[in-house]
Image (spheres, coloured by chain):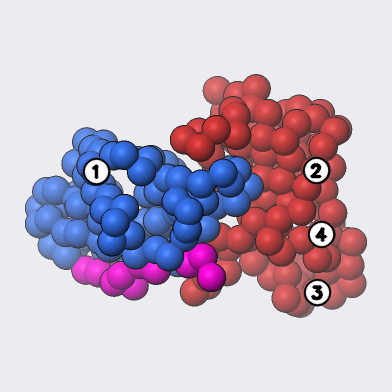
């Protein structure tokens, strides 16, 4: 069964610290992996999209990595800010699938404290 | 650009009542989607549309109907609401159906069915 598992479920860090969120998937065949940020009470916003051939992709202080061999991805947040407090959702698309066939993880809830 | 907007933001229904959720996008996107988000679960696709006048079933279509009479609007209907349909509903749109196209999400509608 195609699944996306994220860890940890929740995380609390101090402002200015770095953190890394994990995503493991069993989706096969694989097309691409996306990370979304979802602020409380808002819709998800895309951070990065990585295809099979991409190992790393950055968006400001957010850096996503992908290991397609081990089916793992991580999202690293550098020098965290209070505004980084949100849920981060990992999403995987099947190869040959469509935008109507995205598999969503349950998300990691990040709280950044002053 | 307003992006993706959803109406209403909140709604409380009694079991058996009907309602329509409206999604509008001003980005000239071909593809539109309706998701539901429940606590402890990833986003799940209800229905989607690949263009004006088309609709298709997603992962959890039962109890919902949709229509796409105009390119910019995608309506989600509940004919006879049930408590199991209490959820947050998100609309999204994308320009194309390519592997790496980004989905843009609306702010969500929080629906409670009593």
Q: Badge 3 local density, few (<14 within 10 Å), some, or many (20+)?
A: some
Question: Helix or strand or loop: what does disc 4 sit on?
Answer: loop
| Rendered location of residue A48, percent (x, y) | 35, 41
Give me the C-alpha separation between circle 2 and circle 4: 12 Å
Give me the C-alpha separation between circle 2 and circle 3: 23 Å
- Tell me, what hue is chain A? blue
Assess whether mark 4 and mark 2 are in contact (beta carbons under 8 angstroms): no
Q: Is residue A5 magenta?
A: yes
Question: Which residue lies under the disc numbered 1?
Answer: A55
Residue depicted at 69% across the width and 70% down the height: B86
Tell me if B4 is positioned left or right of B68 in this view.
left
Give above or below for A77 relative to A7: above
- Tell me, what hue is chain B? red
Question: Which residue lies under the disc numbered 3?
Answer: B82
Q: Earlier in the sequence, mark 2 or mark 4?
A: 2
Per the rendering, the mark at residue B64 is 4
Give me the C-alpha separation between circle 1 and circle 2: 35 Å
Question: Mark 3 against mark 1, which lies toward the viewer?
Answer: 1
Q: Are marks 4 and 1 on the same chain?
A: no
Q: Earlier in the sequence, mark 2 or mark 3?
A: 2
Question: Mark 3 against mark 4, which lies toward the viewer?
Answer: 4
Q: Badge 1 local density, few (<14 within 10 Å), some, or many (20+)?
A: few
The magenta span reads A1-12
Q: Are marks 3 and 4 on the same chain?
A: yes
Q: Is residue B39 magenta?
A: no
């Amino acid at each position: 069964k195609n699944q996306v598992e994220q860890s940890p479920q929740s995380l609390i860090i101090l402002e200015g610290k770095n953190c890394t969120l994990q995503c493991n998937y069993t989706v096969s065949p694989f097309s691409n992996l996306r990370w979304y940020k979802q602020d409380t009470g808002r819709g998800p916003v895309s951070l990065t999209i990585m295809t099979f051939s991409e190992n790393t992709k950055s968006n400001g202080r957010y850096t996503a990595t992908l290991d397609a061999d081990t089916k793992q991805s991580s999202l690293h947040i550098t020098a965290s800010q209070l505004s980084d407090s949100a849920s981060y959702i990992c999403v995987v698309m099947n190869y040959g699938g469509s935008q109507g066939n995205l598999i969503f993880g349950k998300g990691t809830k990040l709280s950044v404290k002053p | 650009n307003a992006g993706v907007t959803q109406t209403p933001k909140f709604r409380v229904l009694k079991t058996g009542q009907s309602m329509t959720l409206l999604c509008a996008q001003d980005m000239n996107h071909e593809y539109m989607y309706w998701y539901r988000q429940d606590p402890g679960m990833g986003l799940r696709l209800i229905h989607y549309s690949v263009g004006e006048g088309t609709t298709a079933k997603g992962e959890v279509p039962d109890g919902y109907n949709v229509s796409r009479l105009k390119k910019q609007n995608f309506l989600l209907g509940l004919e006879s609401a049930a408590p199991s349909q209490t959820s947050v509903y998100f609309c999204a749109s994308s320009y194309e159906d390519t592997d790496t196209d980004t989905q843009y999400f609306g702010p969500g509608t929080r629906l409670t069915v009593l």
